[in-house]
Amino acid sequence: MFEITPWRPLRELSNLRREMEDLWGNLAGEREFLPMRGEWMPALDVSETKDSLIVKAEIPGMEPKDVDISLSGDLLVIKGEKKQKTEEKKENFHRVETRYGAFSRTIRVPVSVDSDKIEASYDNGVLKIVLPKKEEVKAKQIEIK
């Protein structure tokens, strides 16, 4: 048995737009600039050592003063804004494709960290945050006798 449904062209256009945005997002990768949304997401690497958690964020072209880092409870928040630089050429056409916009990344920290000893550094477009673990969280070796 067939079911007759009304044709809704505006709904189909909306669905098509959403599918195209998903397609471009998948092709470009999560960290690429999404022109329809005006935002970008820096790639993050999170690793754990015996003594600390290390978070690295790729934020090329940004100044450290344009990045805010905060720890509230067990949430580490990294946010900032990359501003577009405008350039004008008078004789020939000149095109600048610079990624810009605001970003915010939140990471749940799985262990207790010593917030007084957190260190952040920035080198060659990579922000590195070292979160030292509290003493009671560090694994202790127990010798078998």
Image (cartoon, helix red, strand yellow):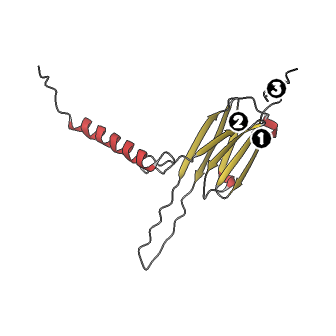
Tell me where residue 45 appears, x and y as whole percent: 62, 43
Residue topped by disc 2 = 71
- How far across and how far down the image is residue 133, in percent? 78, 33
Judging by the rendered image, the residue that carries numbered circle 1 is 118
Under mark 2, the amino acid is: Leu
Q: Residue at x 80, y 31 (%)?
A: 134
**What residue lies at 70% left-to-right and 48% top-to-bottom?**
128
Q: Is residue 127 left or right of residue 116?
A: left
Q: Which residue is denoted by mark 3 in the rendering? A: 136
Q: Report helix, strand or loop for mark 1.
A: loop
Residue 96 vs residue 125, the one in the foreground: 125
Indicate left or right for 23 with 66 as reference: left
Amino acid at circle 3: Glu
| Distance CA(mark 3)–CA(mark 2) | 19 Å
The crowding category of the residue bearing disc 1, from other C-alpha atoms within 10 Å (few below 14, some 14 to 19, many at least 20), is some
Q: Name the front one of labels 2 and 1.
A: 1
Instruction: Indicate the quadrant where residue 12 lies.
Output: top left
Looking at the rendered structure, the secondary structure element under dot 3 is loop
Mark 3 burial class by Cα count in 10 Å: few <14, some 14-19, many 20+: few
Q: Position of residue 98 (x, y in %)?
A: 51, 60
State yes or no: discs 2 and 1 in contact (Cβ < 8 Å).
Answer: yes
Q: CA distance from mark 1 to mark 3?
A: 17 Å
Determine whether 118 is above or below 93 in the image.
above
